[in-house]
Amino acid sequence: MLDADIGGFLGLGMCLLVTPYTRLSRIAMLWLAALLWLLPDLAQADDKRFRLSAPVVLVESGLLGYLVPRFALKTGVRVEVVAEASEAEIILGQEEGRAVFEGAGAVWRMGVSGTHPGAALFADWLTSEIGQRTVTSYEVAGVAPFGLPQVVEKPEAAAVFDGDPALGKEVSLLQCGRCHVVAPENRMGAIGSTPSFAVLRTFADWDARFQSFFALKPHPAFTQVAGVTQPFASHLPSPISPIEVTLDELEAIIAYVAGLAPADLGAPIQVQ
């Protein structure tokens, strides 16, 4: 509707401007001035009106009839409820978008289409403390049929390592035990300044560290992973005792470490 109004003004203005005279007539100048004066208000009016789509069951619940006037009173933005989602800037449904309230047998989600300023304002209002309180204050015969959505956190899936832990321990003692304490068997044969496998197991990203250990210093200087790392530089002296593992052995090492109990490092140091 707005586009048609603007188009009509522009068309009429152009008709008045296109005259056989070389100078604008007084009437044409008045129409042009009126058009320029009205355009900002017409654009602002469009910003203050948007369409919201909702299923019949939600419309008939009376909730929108309770929410929309309160939002309009606070913001001056008019909301037109329509049936077709393709015509709306805000969509309330059960499939996509952010969960905003529940009731009438469903969890209702809000999707925002486009960047309409009025729709964005409504989305911010509905998800704010005031908007959510407005939802829960709606009552029918003394009962509040709608409430806030119950957010259920999905548990993180535990990582699964398919390697052979027994092989992993064997390879770790052979290849890594020269520096790290891998198990009680080599408790006295490692380098004291390097963390044990049990200490490394306390890190939140321990699995990522082990998966890429060959790229972390100082390992690149003496480590080869078949099919992954580049051969040692031919112009440099070769390591006296290189570490050589396969991808299967690396997976076995990770499976072994996954079964280790993280070291008890005690409480954090407190400075007084």
Image: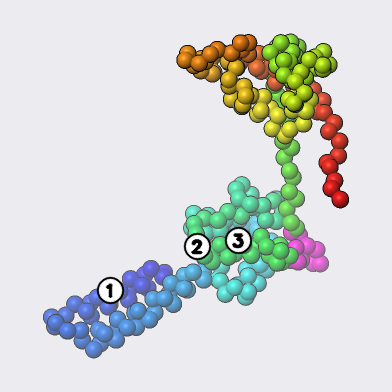
Mark 1–mark 2 distance (CA, rounded to whole Å): 26 Å
State whether residue 142 is above or below residue 249: below
Whether residue 106 is visible, yes or no, is yes
Range drawn in magenta: 135-146
The residue pinned by badge 1 equals: 11
Q: Horizontal and vertical percent for residue 71?
A: 63, 70
Q: Horizontal and vertical percent for residue 41?
A: 44, 77
Which residue occupies 75% across, 50% down? 150
Q: Tag 1, which secondary structure?
A: helix
Whether residue 69 is visible, yes or no, is no
The residue pinned by badge 2 equals: 116
Residue type at mark 3 is Ala
Mark 1–mark 3 distance (CA, rounded to whole Å): 36 Å
For this view, does 254 lie left or right of residue 49? right
Judge whether residue 140 is colored magenta. Answer: yes
For this view, does 9 lie left or right of residue 129? left
Residue type at mark 1 is Gly
The residue pinned by badge 3 equals: 123
Q: Which comes before the other along the chain, label 1 or label 3?
A: 1
State whether residue 7 is above or below residue 247: below
